[in-house]
Amino acid sequence: MSEGQKDSRAPDDARTPTPARSALSSHRPDRSAPSATSARDAHPSHLLLRLLVLLLALAAWQLAADAHGSVYFPPPSRIAHRAYELWFSGPVRHLFLTSAAFEDVLPSLGRMAAGFGIAALGGIAAGVVVGRSRWAYAVCNPVLQFARAVPPPALVPVLVVVLDFGTPMQITSIAFSAVWPVLINTAEGVRNTDPLRIDVAAVLRLGPLERLRFLLLPSALPRIFAGLRLSLSLSLILMVFSELLPGTADGIGFTLTDAQSRSDLLTVWAALLLLGVLGHLLNTALLAVERRLIGRGRTTP
Amino acid sequence: MTLRLDALGQRYGDHLVLHGIDLTVPDGQLLCVVGPSGCGKSTLLRTVAGLQPASEGTVTVDGTPVTGVPDQLAVVFQDYGRSLFPWLTVRDNVALPLRRRGLARAERRAEAERILERVGLDGAGCRHPWQLSGGMQQRVAIARALVCRPSLLLMDEPFGSLDAQTREDLEDLLLEVHRTDGATIVFVTHDIDESVYVGDRVVVLSPGPGSRVVLDLPVQLPGKRDQIGTRGLPEFVELRAEVGRAVRGAQGYPTG
């Protein structure tokens, strides 16, 4: 009997390390809950500090530009005023936007939305296909890495030859440049799906679409968004770049070259300011979507 | 559901994990499989679940050879943190297997709530798994396994990473489920006490490579099992010693 007592201690000892492991695994989701984005930049004193740095930078720019007095480097107050005159002094019923704002900004945004949309959908779809199969991943990876390594603006001259100047060429260059980061990141995310969860899906006999909806996409979502953020900034770059080419009649890039040809440096700077603000707003919007989708505590691979 | 393993063997390349396992689990039996870690208990379960084809021999369920995941089968894994889907609520996790039965959304939810209440988690349906304690998460996993009323339930060291008190509660929950549902259950554990307490029968595997069955012991204990009383019974102590001896002997330790 005492022997039985002794015997039963063996599994007891073996059991001791397991609670620690369980604590670890059950905390993993909690720790990554604020995952990519949330709490990091929410602290109020950080916000104040950031505002302060921004104001200081603007003040320094203003003082330096005033002191120098060059026409090529106008002070920010005048740039902001020109931006206001050009785009934001419209009637109330147009949300203060001028007709120039509609002519310059909307076509640009439309082309960018189309290009980015195509890149996002196509990239996610192709990424799932590539990431699902070990074979497809191994075969496609070198090509994908190559495609990603080509500097996107270098493709535009090729597309100009193929598609001629105009909106289709512009949308294609945006989509073709922005698709790779989403594709590669989605494939990587899908490929790294927890193998135990794949077993679970098999045991629950989920169909292919349910597997996609309830397992593969949610578990790859952090990676997908990492890809989308890269793609978004590429889209903005390609949007401007494709509008700098001859044959364009509208858009922010066109405003830029047009103002430059008229030596209207103030408008050039205003367009740059607008692009910066636009890029920042778009990125913030994407982050908000990401936070909404991923913020509910989940494991990141 | 009757489960039958005939000369089952499993190897990874040159490495032999299981060899010559013959085992028949009659309908409604709760079989515990005990063995030192690394002896291929999990491999055995994965093979029965159809997640991995057998390299030798056959597995049949009610006379039908297992080639994919059998119908009416459910599995509870040890690592509840990974086995549950953290992006779904507790209720949606539990309702997930009901989708293939073509039930309407409201029916699926009602069924999930009913089963959650049964495992003692009423009111937790709207929370996410990671907001619950380990024991509660494993209850969710058990609810997800039970929601389709499986007739064959496989459990891979399900309580292995829980604290003693929680583990005892869940052992009793399992016994209650087995009494009322009468499913065939294969319960893998490395805990000798646990195997005797929950099992109708205990099978001990030898350490790898090439694990085989070294002890096949029916467990007959008088009366309804309860944590304090049953564990003090002379029959219980006797059986535990016998299983312990087999495990130790199988590990090559002196048996005294």
Image (tube, coloured by chain):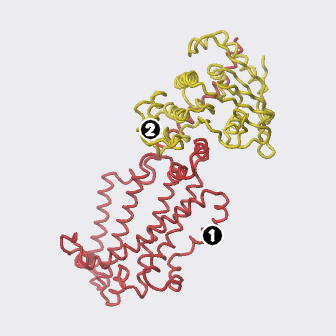
Query: Do the residues indicated by labels 1 and 2 lie within the same chain of the protein?
Result: no
At mark 1, the secondary structure is helix
**Viewer-nearest of discs 1 and 2:** 2
Q: Nearer the viewer, residue A208 or B172?
A: A208
Which mark is on residue A143? 1
Residue at position x 36%, y 83% in the image: A254
Q: Amino acid at mark 1?
A: Val
Q: In the image, is residue A66 above or below residue A13? A: below
Q: Residue furthest left?
A: A92
Which mark is on residue B107? 2
Chain in yellow on the image: B
Residue at position x 69%, y 29% in the image: B2
Q: Amino acid at mark 2?
A: Glu
Q: Residues within 10 Å of mark 1 (few under 14, many from 20)?
A: few
Image coordinates for residue B41, horizontal then vertical, percent: 70, 33
The answer to which quarter of the image holds residue A197 is top right
Do the residues under discs 1 and 2 have CB atoms within 8 angstroms? no
